[in-house]
């Protein structure tokens, strides 16, 4: 369809109305298409990921004011639920050793029995930085276990 633009002298109220309707029709279909694309895109993100049963190990690291520390996390999954967790600390100084030890002593109660996608620890037994390394390792485990 071609649109012929009239000179100002030839424009009438009727031709402006037709031109305006055509422009609005084009805008509304583009807008409604974008809205439906957005709605369709949201549906894809709500699909649940399932994970293969098994035991997975990964390492995560985190920064402290004095150093970069790491922890090795081993998680056993059954039907997407954490059935066992083991965290091994690799501290480089006494303060990190204390906080990792406190985290390791309390993390099992926070994660065992939960769906792996619902596991979120920010502070365990007074240790807040160690959870960053744990979360990093857990993300890697989830990627490895994704079926």
Image (spheres, rainbow, N blue to C red):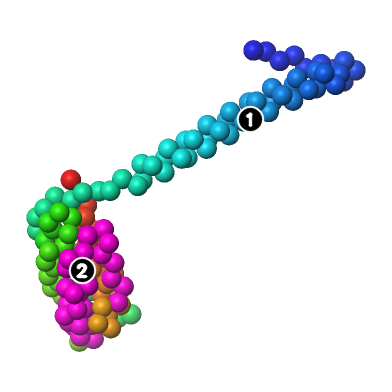
Residue at 18%, 75% (x, y): give it. Answer: 109
Q: Quadrant of residue 110?
A: bottom left
Q: Is residue 140 above or below residue 10?
A: below
Left or right relative to 29: residue 39? left
SS assignment for the magenta stretch, majority? helix
- Magenta segment: 95-123
Q: Nearer the viewer, residue 10 or 45?
A: 45
Within the magenta stretch, is there residue 100?
A: yes
- In the rendered structure, the answer to whether residue 84 lies left or right of residue 37 reads left
Residue at point 80%, 22% (across, down): 16
Residue 127 vs 9, above or below: the answer is below
Say if 101 sits above or below 82 in the image.
Answer: below
Q: Residue at x 17, y 68 (%)?
A: 112
SS of the residue under disc 2 = helix
| Element type at mark 1 | helix
Q: Which residue is found at the position 52% from the left and 35% from the top?
A: 34
Q: Position of residue 35 (x, y in %)?
A: 52, 37
The quadrant in which the C terminus is found is top left
Counting from the top left corner in percent of width and height, residue 131 is at 27, 72
The earlier-in-sequence mark between 2 and 1 is 1
Residue 90 seen in this snapshot: no
Q: Position of residue 99 (x, y in %)?
A: 23, 82
User: Which mark, residue 111?
Assistant: 2
Furthest-left residue in this view: 54
Answer left or right for 65 relative to 25: left
Outermost residue, right side: 9
Point out residue 77 in the picture as x, y percentages from the top left corner: 13, 58
Q: Name the mark on residue 4.
A: none
> Alpha-carbon distance for marks 2 and 1?
51 Å
What label does residue 27 carry, if any?
1
- 107 magenta-colored: yes
Dividing the picture into quarters, in which one does residue 115 lie? bottom left
């Amino acid at each position: 369809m071609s649109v012929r633009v009239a000179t100002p002298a030839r424009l009438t109220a009727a031709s402006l109305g037709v031109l305006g309707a055509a422009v609005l029709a084009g805008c509304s279909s583009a807008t409604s298409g974008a809205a439906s694309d957005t709605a369709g895109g949201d549906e894809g993100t709500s699909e649940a990921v399932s994970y293969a049963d098994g035991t997975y190990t990964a390492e995560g690291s985190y920064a402290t004011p004095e150093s970069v520390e790491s922890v090795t996390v081993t998680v056993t999954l059954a039907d997407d639920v954490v059935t066992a967790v083991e965290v091994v600390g690799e501290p480089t100084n006494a303060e990190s050793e204390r906080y990792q030890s406190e985290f390791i002593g309390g993390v099992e109660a926070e994660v065992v029995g939960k769906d792996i996608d619902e596991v979120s620890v920010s502070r365990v037994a007074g240790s807040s930085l160690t959870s960053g390394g744990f979360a990093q390792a857990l993300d890697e485990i989830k990627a490895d276990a994704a079926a």
